[in-house]
Image: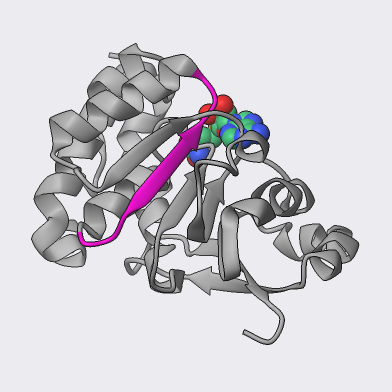
Amino acid sequence: MTDETLPLSSDPLHGSEEIRAYFGDVYPRVLAFAELLADQGVTRGLIGPREVSRLWERHILNSAALAPFLPSGVVADVGSGAGLPGMVLAAMDPARDYILIEPMERRTQWLFEAARDCGIENVRIVRGRAEEVAESVEADVVTARAVASIDKLVKWCSPLLSAQGRMVLLKGRSAPDELERAKYTLRKHRFTGEVHEAPTLPGVEPTTVVVLSRSGS
Ligand SMILES: C[S@@+](CC[C@H](N)C(=O)[O-])C[C@H]1O[C@@H](n2cnc3c(N)ncnc32)[C@H](O)[C@@H]1O
């Protein structure tokens, strides 16, 4: 067996007590999504086969790390793709409405089926580009991972947000430079940005989270 074909059981966090305790009551839904992603998510080309043996740290926990930064209200996850971070966050937070925005038909079909098969009922899937769906989306929070620069995300997503809406973005270590490059756009749209290191489990690399809040909110 090559590294490319390792099963989900090869992920050292899979089924661990730490993961069960971290997710608590919502663990069964998150587990169902992780298992679907490791199986059909790979065969349907949503994630690479090499991701399976590091699925919990790289993808599921990395997405879950955004949860403490979400203010109340509707969340729109832009460029959901495989469902990251939107489907994970929706699975963790069944009382809140999530809108998953994704332009590619093949990926929206995956998102519909994953929500149905994993019992994640609090998601609405919108097919389209973020900058083209303002008529059908109004959210209090926008999330995104690996979709575009901060500058572009602010331009595309500001029209989707309520007046005091916030953006909570998963970013890499270059987040401070990206914020600097976006400073005129941030000012124009009344956002101020902060970079946070968000821990999940001991021994797991923290996630870099950029929070954009409206000035004065
Ligand atoms: C690299 S993938 C990341 C997917 C997922 N967020 C993740 O972290 O695995 C980028 C996703 O953004 C979507 N995308 C690209 N441009 C977009 C736009 N203007 N509005 C919404 N989604 C977009 C792509 O179709 C793709 O699914």
Image quadrant occupied by the N terminus: top left
The quarter holding residue 34 reads top left
Q: Nearer the viewer, residue 44 or 95?
A: 95
The residue positioned 16% from the left and 43% from the top of the image is 31
Estimate the x, y position of residue 13 in percent, counting from the top left.
Answer: 23, 49
- Residue 101 colored in magenta in the image: yes
Extent of the magenta region: 95-104
The residue positioned 20% from the left and 47% from the top of the image is 30
Q: Ligand 1: which quarter?
A: top right
The residue positioned 9% from the left and 62% from the top of the image is 25
- Residue 217 colored in magenta in the image: no
The residue positioned 84% from the left and 70% from the top of the image is 187
Q: Nearer the viewer, residue 208 or 84?
A: 84
Estimate the x, y position of residue 136 in percent, counting from the top left.
Answer: 50, 41
Q: Is residue 8 visible?
A: no
Q: Nearer the viewer, residue 100 or 144?
A: 100
Estimate the x, y position of residue 174 in percent, counting from the top left.
Answer: 73, 57
The quarter holding residue 109 reads top left
